[in-house]
Amino acid sequence: MQYGITHLSIVPLRKEASDTSEMVSQLLFGDTFEILETTKKWAFIRLSYDSYEAWIDTKQFLVIEHANFEQLTAVKPKLTGALTQFIQAENEDLTVLPLGCELPNYKNNTIVINDTSYRYEGALFDTNLGKTNIINTAFLYLNAPYLWGGKTPFGIDCSGFTQMVYKLNGFKLPRDASQQVKRGRVLSFIEESEPGDLAFFDNEEGNITHVGIIMKNNYIIHASGKVRIDRLDQFGIFNPDTKKHSHKLRVIKRII
């Protein structure tokens, strides 16, 4: 078994081993993974954070030793705490990091990957604030454009949004809405919910296709076209711009 780590800011994960294949998710700087299969140009990987499996270009990651992989995955990582920050390599090259990147082996403003050190003097996210900070974190992504498979303020999908907001507050969620809905406790009524709970929505076939974060006073923040705030009622999400319901409510879950 081989192991890898992302040393670039944002890297696409593909459904198939092709540059033209659908992007199903993204890796951010510092993400670690197992390498399950390799071809000349592509690697099929399993992320250590959420066990998500997909293809990545072999030019877009570094191989690390098993001992280093075990060390990195055994500790709670430090996370970048601003929309964008820079790291500087020893040769003075700069890399832009989006919100929520893991900072491997962080100590005294220094990051180390294999034999390369980087200087990081930016903000760190406090992952110990708990559920009360979920909504404040969600606001950091407000107006981010919708991007299928995206996980950053520069483009994000509905489940990437909920996963990243929860991650920044120290709580782990699976990658996709259909996986996230299996977590937590069902709430019978919207009135039982509290800020930070998740609402899930289905299509005509009954498949979970959307998720958002419940706010107070029957509002919801979610990624649809962009990260936006809409009304939530017993039928689903009401879009005040179109004066129509955009998503049909299936279930409300308390994850934390």
Image: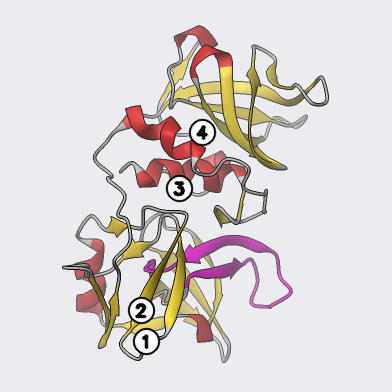
| Amino acid type at image mark 2 | Gln
Separation of marks 2 and 1 at Cα, in angstroms? 5 Å
**35 shown above or below 221:** below
Residue type at numbered disc 4: Val
Camera-near label (3 vs 1) is: 1
- What is the three-letter code of the residue carrying label 3? Met
Residue underneath mark 2: 88
Answer left or right for 95 relative to 240.
Answer: left
Q: Which residue is mark 4?
A: 181
Please tell me how crowded label 1 is: few (under 14), some (14-19), or many (20+) other residues with Cα within 10 Å.
Answer: few
Mark sitting earlier along the chain (1/4):
1
Tag 1 secondary structure: loop
Label whose residue precedes the other's in the sequence (2 or 3): 2
Picture residue at 16% right of the left edge, 68% below the top: 108
Instruction: State the residue at coordinates (41%, 70%).
Output: 86
Q: Which mark is residue 92?
A: 1
Name the residue beneath numbered marker 3: 164
